[in-house]
Image (spheres, rainbow, N blue to C red):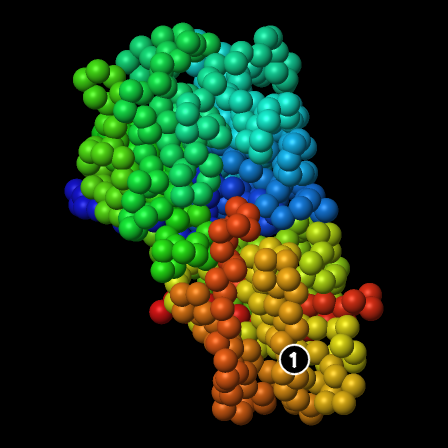
């Protein structure tokens, strides 16, 4: 039996925050937050905890996030498995600014991780970061953050509450228990309960999602408490050392292998030059152990997340790559790598059938829209990569645009696009928004008379270099590289940079562009 040696972190690169891990027999699954990106909740599968494959996305039906602000919608999905059924709880956040949380929690179930999933069951509102614990006696307990708008200051998280869930009545029943007030680290979130050696262990995230993020552990003999905090808290954090490779370590969940080895999945980030988390928050795994006095510790000692972790005693199980590095749009449906903003792609604006071998996108609203953006994109997963597309587009006005976009949210993007100028005709331009400040880079390169245009973005750390080629001409490089430092988590939100293609028609005539291919090449 071939045995794997090391897990290399992060195991899911690019925007993959808030991981929740579960084992179902010999299979392991991780789900992560998706916020305003559609489809919601990707599922990553492994059999050895070292090799992972994106196999599906869960929230493809019964969802509509149109109008939800940036960094809202799907927060912190938590997956569990009990007696042959998968349970997924998640939050749909409609507004997250202070003092209130307009957020609604739902439960869906399936007997197969690939679906079909049930219609959502509404659980409660006003709180977030839910999880579901299945006790040995068959009772189910629903946990979430307790958000109290009356608390002074911006941090209104007042701990963790819990209520029983009835599978028969399909609703929460009985009293609400306040089981944890949090610690001095504050901002207590992401609760998960595990039972081990006669104790209920409560795992929470504290310290916020930035540099001071951490994992806190508390335990109790009774599920309703009182909970005793680990005397060596926090159990995991990067807050003490800005030179660690894996920063912002926190938001943990646990899994036990068939060989009785314990691991914690957690989020982390790898800031470019120690400053800009352009890839967003990613997912890592750490080996953990239970001490003789019954506390959870990193097996390596200390509190620091490790880049290399000893793998479990499981047979090595690699997967055939399905990364979609080159998409020629010859399939009948979009590859699962692709994402859209808030709304599902459909034939009314995003068609693989109207012109075979091409993706036809009809113009939608602006890059600042919260409703009808016609954009498809994939996660940036490498610090250095090339992104290229081939496009045919004949705009008739400056209000019609199509091209290559690097996108964090409505306030932060860089857009290399084709449009129309009254004097130069068909032309190339760049626009960007930096922390909400819009800028039109008025270079207006005429490409009038050309039919096919290739656009390329060479990304390296915190800069991008654009180039173009028309009708099989040689590549021409835009002179000045552009900073993409603003396409990062710092001060922006909770996602990460995406690279993709989009079309706008601000006249509402749905002028279309045809894309022949899209290439993503890691360097």
Above or below, 320 relative to 307: below
Q: Is residue 21 visible?
A: no
Above or below, 132 relative to 357: above
Disc 1 is placed on an element classified as strand
Closer-to-camera residue (313/7): 7
Where is residue 225, by image quadrant?
A: top left
Q: Position of residue 467 (x, y in %)?
A: 51, 81
Residue at (60, 24) in percent of width and height: 151
- Taking the image as shown, residue 233 lies to the left or right of residue 361, namely left
Residue at (49, 12) in percent of width and height: 139
Query: To which residue does mark 1 refer?
Result: 442
Closer-to-camera residue (253/516): 253
Q: Position of residue 198 (x, y in %)?
A: 31, 10
- Taking the image as shown, residue 480 lies to the left or right of residue 317, namely right
Q: Quadrant of the N terminus?
A: top left
Above or below, 133 relative to 31: above
Q: Position of residue 401 (x, y in %)?
A: 70, 73
């Amino acid at each position: 039996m071939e045995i794997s040696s090391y897990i290399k972190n992060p195991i899911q690169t690019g925007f993959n925050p808030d991981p929740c891990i579960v084992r179902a027999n010999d299979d392991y699954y991780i789900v992560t937050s998706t916020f305003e990106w559609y489809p919601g909740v990707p599922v990553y599968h492994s059999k050895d905890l070292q090799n992972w494959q994106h196999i599906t996305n869960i929230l493809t039906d019964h969802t509509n996030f149109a109008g939800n602000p940036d960094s809202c919608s799907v927060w912190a999905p938590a997956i569990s498995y009990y007696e042959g059924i998968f349970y997924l709880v998640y939050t749909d956040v409609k507004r997250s600014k202070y003092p209130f949380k307009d957020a609604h929690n739902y439960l869906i179930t399936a007997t197969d991780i690939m679906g079909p999933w049930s219609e959502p069951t509404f659980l409660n509102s006003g709180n977030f970061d839910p999880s579901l614990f299945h006790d040995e006696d068959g009772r189910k307990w629903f946990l979430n953050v307790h958000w109290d708008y009356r608390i002074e200051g911006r941090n209104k998280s007042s701990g963790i509450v819990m209520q029983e869930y009835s599978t028969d009545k399909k609703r929460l029943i009985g009293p609400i228990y306040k089981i944890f007030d949090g610690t001095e680290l504050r901002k207590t979130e992401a609760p998960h309960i595990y039972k081990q050696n006669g104790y209920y262990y409560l795992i929470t995230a504290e310290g916020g999602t930035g540099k001071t993020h951490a994992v806190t552990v508390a335990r109790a003999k009774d599920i309703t408490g009182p909970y005793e905090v680990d005397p060596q808290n926090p159990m995991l954090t990067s807050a003490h050392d800005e030179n660690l490779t894996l920063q912002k370590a926190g938001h943990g969940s646990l899994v036990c292998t068939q060989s009785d080895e314990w691991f914690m999945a957690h989020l982390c980030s790898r800031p470019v030059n120690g400053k800009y988390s352009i890839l967003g928050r990613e997912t890592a795994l750490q080996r953990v152990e239970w001490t003789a006095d019954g506390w959870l510790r990193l097996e390596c000692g200390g509190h620091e997340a490790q880049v290399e972790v000893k793998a479990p005693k499981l047979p090595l199980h690699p997967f055939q790559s399905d990364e979609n590095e080159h998409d020629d749009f010859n399939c009948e449906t979009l590859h699962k790598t692709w994402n859209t903003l808030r709304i599902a792609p459909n034939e009314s604006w995003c068609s693989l059938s109207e012109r075979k071998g091409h993706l036809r996108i009809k113009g939608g609203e602006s890059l600042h829209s919260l409703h009808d953006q016609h954009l498809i994109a994939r996660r940036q997963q490498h610090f250095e990569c090339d992104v290229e597309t081939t496009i045919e587009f004949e705009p008739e006005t400056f209000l019609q645009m199509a091209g290559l976009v690097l996108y964090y949210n409505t306030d932060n993007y860089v857009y290399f696009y084709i449009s129309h100028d009254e004097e130069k005709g068909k032309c190339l331009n760049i626009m960007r928004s930096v922390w909400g400040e819009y800028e039109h880079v008025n270079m207006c390169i005429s490409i009038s008379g050309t039919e096919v245009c290739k656009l390329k973005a060479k990304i390296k750390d915190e800069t991008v270099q654009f180039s173009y080629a028309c009708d099989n001409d040689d590549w021409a490089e835009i002179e000045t590289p552009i900073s993409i430092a603003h396409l990062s988590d710092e001060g922006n939100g909770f996602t990460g940079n995406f690279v993709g293609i989009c079309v706008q028609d601000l006249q509402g005539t749905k002028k279309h562009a045809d894309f022949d291919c899209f290439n993503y090449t890691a360097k």
